[in-house]
Amino acid sequence: MRIDKLLANVGFGSRKEVKKILKAGVVKVDDEVVSDPKTHVNPEEQEVTVHGERIVYKEFIYLMMNKPAGYLSATEDLSQETVIDLLEYEDAIYDPFPVGRLDKDTEGLLIITNDGQLAHQLTSPKKHVPKTYFAHILGEVTEDDVKAFKQGVVLDDGYVTKPGELSIVESGPQSIIYLTITEGKFHQVKRMFEAVGKKVTYLKRVKMGPLPLDEELEIGEYRELTDEEVDLLKNAKGVNA
């Protein structure tokens, strides 16, 4: 990789700004001053420093966020805040994007990465990677609903969902449930409950594939995934795989 591209990628500005830094003689590769922007370096094997501070380069970044309500699952929007607005600069410079979508008013587990291959694997309809949600429901959720979800319900546009695993925590005028589905249709969880005459009043995703939400993450907080967690996601199997 060229040194100017490396420095630009880790946040030292545009190529033009990086050239000024190089000309100033403050960039070293293995303790040797480098001023030519075309110089090739291997950041995994060579030590690159600017003003004596080591540069840490990563090709991919993997983040777990406990998404708050009120933010769009998008990279940018002209009028509304997105989950990317919650990232620190040193993470945002990698141009990550949310994997799949959580509705604006939905909380919980959101993976943010710049690894397109992993994102496709987790969201492709053909992969059937399960996602688990915790929800409060207006209306009494019954065993009949459990059976209906297991068979698949008909949404308002006529689409028949794939089977969902509905688990009742508390049943009553205000029910509490967990629901695992393998699809990601628009407002799917809400529309599934509307199909059986009930309404979702609170929704939170708590698991994606084999990876659960870190309970220590406060709403709006995020952290990098560990190597083990990344491997879990990369090896995630669909329920029908």
Image: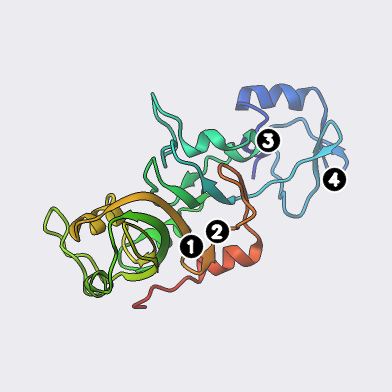
Q: Residue at x 39, y 41 (%)?
A: 105
> 14 or 137: nearer the eye?
137
Q: Say which residue label 4 marks.
A: 30
Q: Earlier in the sequence, mark 2 or mark 3?
A: 3
Q: Earlier in the sequence, mark 2 or mark 4?
A: 4
Q: Residue at x 55, y 69 (%)?
A: 232
Are dots 2 and 3 in contact, CB under 8 Å? no
Please tell me how crowded label 3 is: few (under 14), some (14-19), or many (20+) other residues with Cα within 10 Å. Answer: many
Q: Earlier in the sequence, mark 1 or mark 3?
A: 3
Residue at the extreme front of the image, as rendered? 173
Please tell me how crowded label 2 is: few (under 14), some (14-19), or many (20+) other residues with Cα within 10 Å. Answer: some
**Residue type, label 2:** Leu
Q: Residue at x 68, y 35 (%)?
A: 7
Q: Say which residue label 1 marks.
A: 207
Left or right of 42 on screen, residue 198? left
Q: Say which residue label 2 marks.
A: 213
Instruction: Tally the numbered discs.
Output: 4
Where does the image place residue 108, in percent across and percent down from the top left?
Answer: 49, 51
Are dots 1 and 4 in contact, CB under 8 Å? no
Residue at the extreme bottom of the image, as rendered? 241
Are dots 1 and 2 in contact, CB under 8 Å? yes
Where does the image place residue 2, in percent across and percent down from the top left?
Answer: 65, 40
